[in-house]
Image: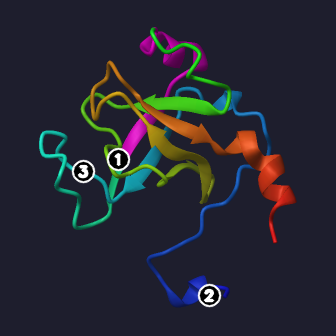
Amino acid sequence: MLCDFTQHSIIRPACLPPTIDSSHLNGKSGIASGWGVVNPNIPSRQANTLQKVTVKILADNECKYKYPTYPSIITPSMFCASADSADACYGDSGGPFTVHQGNVSVLEGVISWGKSCAKTKWPGVYARVRYVLDWITKNNS
């Protein structure tokens, strides 16, 4: 089934990134969204409305530095992003991470994991969509 986005003024699709190279994203901000936990001190209570947070993409070496005991876990298929007191949290995994480029939103990541919620010391870790573009293209049917 195709969705006619002209009939829905509040929803728009996110585009796939055009290339595999993502080095130009370091330092840019993106939006993570989901229905996960709003307050990490109450992990059993998830959001009643869709939440979004703007976070900054970290350079790969900074991401590995933030997780020094986990250097082999941060792979080229991942990137980190964080903000001072906001981040994706438990229950947001699988949600989109988009970066606004021009007049479109580009799906750069998928919320994956983190050691904690909303702590600068532990940025959120995202699956890098650009890393799997070939697979997406080959399996698009």
State how far apart marks 3 and 1 are (Cα): 13 Å
The residue to which callout 1 is attached is 53
Amino acid on which the number 1 mark rests in the picture? Val
Q: Residue furthest right?
A: 138
- Where's residue 116, x and y in %? 30, 30
Element type at marker 1? strand
The magenta segment is 53-68
Q: Quadrant of residue 129?
A: top right
> Disc 2 to disc 3, how far (Cα)?
31 Å
Q: At 77% across and 34% down in the image, what residue appears? A: 21
Please tell me which of labels 2 and 3 falls first in the chain: 2
Q: Spatial distance from mark 2 to mark 1, Cα to Cα? A: 27 Å
Does 1 sit above or below residue 131?
below
Residue drawn at (63%, 24%) of the image: 75
**Which tag, 2 or 1, sits closer to the chain's start?**
2
- In the image, residue 20 sits, relative to residue 60, either above or below, namely below
Q: Amino acid at mark 2?
A: Asp
Where residue 22 sits: x, y (%)? Answer: 70, 33
Task: Look at label 3 and name its amino acid.
Answer: Val
Task: Tell me: residue 15, above or below residue 130.
Answer: below
N-term-proximal mark, 3 vs 1: 3
The answer to whether residue 60 is above or below residue 112 is above
Side (left or right) of 39 relative to 21: left
Asked if the residues shown at circle 2 and circle 3 are in contact, with their CB atoms under 8 angstroms apart, the answer is no
Q: Which residue is mark 2?
A: 4
Q: Which residue is mark 3?
A: 37
